[in-house]
Structure formats: structure tokens, C-alpha cells
């Protein structure tokens, strides 16, 4: 990933598996951590993308040179 990557650019599709059926098998994805507002995660597909930060790019090495994020998948029963 290079700095100044365009907003909406797909970084990765992160997935998890849950063998439960029905709503207990439905997974919701989230990302947390310092700088997580600069990224987007599609809560149903797990697509992880560069966020939309207005006129300036979200990723700028001089502004922040690294990110430590936690990516979670939670099932319909509220279990991680």
C-alpha cells in the first residue's frame, strides 16, 4: 500500500468462518484502533478499504507512518 492511495481502494477482503446456522452464523465485521477512521470496512462482506477523508488523502506517511488496527468478526449471537 502506498501513501496517497485513492479513497475507496480495496486493501483486502478479510473473512471469518462460523459454522452456526441462521442469525448465529451471520458475521459482522469491524475495525478499531488509532487511525481506524482512515479506513472503511464493509460490515457484511469484510472488504477493507481506504477511507474518505475529504480533500486530502487518508494515508500520508508524513502525517502517520504506521497503523495498529484490530479487525473483528462478530456472529449473530454476539460472540467474537
Image (cartoon, grey):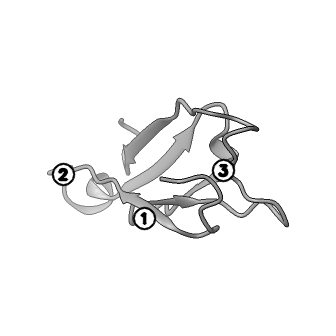
- Residue ID for mark 3: 59
Q: Position of residue 25 (x, y in %)?
A: 26, 55
Work out which residue is located at the far right of the displayed protein and give it.
55
- Of badges 2 and 3, the one in the foreground is 3
Location of residue 47 (image quadrant): bottom left
Q: Position of residue 43 (x, y in %)?
A: 48, 60
**SS under mark 1:** loop
Location of residue 11 (image quadrant): bottom left
Distance in Å between CA atoms under marks 1 and 3: 24 Å
Look at 58% across and 70% down and name the residue there: 8
Distance in Å between CA atoms under marks 2 and 3: 37 Å
Look at 39% across and 66% down and name the residue there: 45
- Residue ID for mark 2: 20
Who comes first in sequence, dot 1 or dot 2? 2
Count of numbered circles on the image = 3
Instruction: Give the left or right position of residue 61, taking residue 43 as reference.
Output: right
Determine whether 79 is above or below 30 in the image.
above
Look at 67% across and 38% down and name the residue there: 35
Q: Position of residue 38 (x, y in %)?
A: 67, 50
The residue lying toward the viewer, choosing from 2 and 33, is 2
Who comes first in sequence, dot 1 or dot 3? 1
- Residue ID for mark 1: 44
Distance in Å between CA atoms under marks 1 and 2: 16 Å
Who comes first in sequence, dot 2 or dot 3? 2
The residue lying toward the viewer, choosing from 42 and 27, is 42
**SS under mark 3:** loop
Instruction: Give the left or right position of residue 79, taking residue 1 as reference.
Output: left
Location of residue 79 (image quadrant): top left
- Of badges 1 and 3, the one in the foreground is 3
Amino acid at each position: 500500500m502506498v501513501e496517497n492511495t485513492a479513497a475507496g481502494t480495496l486493501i483486502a477482503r478479510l473473512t471469518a468462518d462460523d459454522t452456526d446456522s441462521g442469525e448465529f452464523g451471520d458475521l459482522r465485521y469491524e475495525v478499531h484502533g488509532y487511525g481506524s477512521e482512515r479506513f472503511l470496512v464493509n460490515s457484511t462482506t469484510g472488504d477493507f478499504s481506504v477511507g474518505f477523508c475529504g480533500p486530502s488523502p487518508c494515508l500520508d506517511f508524513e502525517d502517520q507512518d504506521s497503523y495498529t488496527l484490530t479487525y473483528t468478526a462478530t456472529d449473530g449471537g454476539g460472540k467474537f
